[in-house]
Amino acid sequence: MRRGVRFTVTPGNHDGLDEVLDLVVREGIERFCLYHLVPSGRGGYLRDITAQQRRGVLARVFRFAEDHPEVEVLTVDNPSDGPALVHWLEERDPDRAVRCREMLSWNAGSKGGPGIGIGCVDERGLVHPDQFSRHRVLGDIREEPFSVIWTEAKDPWLAELRSSERPLASVCGACPDLAMCGGGNRARAELATGDPWALDPSCSRTDIAAVPH
Ligand code: SF4
């Protein structure tokens, strides 16, 4: 049986990351997943780490992945992790950074995520763009087939989300990493600010994204 450790990083536990990674190695656990907090449901009672702390956590996880190829390492719910990885590689292995940038740009970050490549049907049959976006109801499978709700996309916000020109906050529009990131996590932006197109507050590049690099 394959085992995995899921670690949602918060101000209360980011200092303990090394101990958790040690545990993964010691126990021969096959997968480690770093989750970024989305303030949905009870997650709304938790605080998030700063962009600087996040960069430190990511660098630690990237180093761990490099040192332990036997462990499958994922980072989840933060499309800005892609650019963070490319910039980390640029300082260590520029050729790999180029390949990584190409692959991430092909994948387009959050442009393949919630509402597009991910959907959620809750316990009542209501359809949401993802499990964190309970506030957005796209349809009800008790009234219409999921295939109709998903492909006809009558919800105007969903149509905007799927359009090639999302009305993102200006900092994302000017960000040189937009092609790799897709503009961050929309559920987190909306839950934190009320604006579905605001800057993702957990972008690890936020305080440096406006600077060309
Ligand atoms: S500023 Fe926007 S596009 Fe750039 S990395 Fe952050 S969330 Fe992604």
Image (spheres, grey):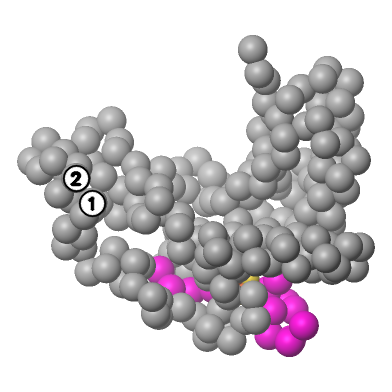
Q: Position of residue 199 (x, y in %)?
A: 54, 73
C-alpha separation, residue under disc 2 versus residue under disc 1 = 5 Å
Specify start and end residues of the magenta stretch as a single range. Answer: 196-213
Q: Position of residue 123 (x, y in %)?
A: 28, 30
Q: Position of residue 120 (x, y in %)?
A: 34, 42
Q: Is residue 135 above or below residue 196?
A: above
Q: Position of residue 48 (x, y in %)?
A: 66, 54
Give amino acid for label 1. Answer: Trp
| Quarter of image, res 18 | top right
As rendered, which of 202 and 130 lies closer to the eye? 130
Q: Element under label 2? A: helix
Q: Residue at x 47, y 68 (%)?
A: 193
- Can residue 70 be seen at all in this image of the molecule? yes
Q: Is residue 47 above or below residue 19?
A: below
> Which residue, given by chain and number where applicable, does mark 1 sit on?
150
Is 202 in the magenta? Answer: yes
Magenta region, main secondary structure: loop
Q: Is residue 144 above or below residue 100?
A: above
Q: Residue at x 75, y 43 (%)?
A: 12
Ligand 1 falls in which quarter?
A: bottom right
Give amino acid for label 2. Answer: Ser
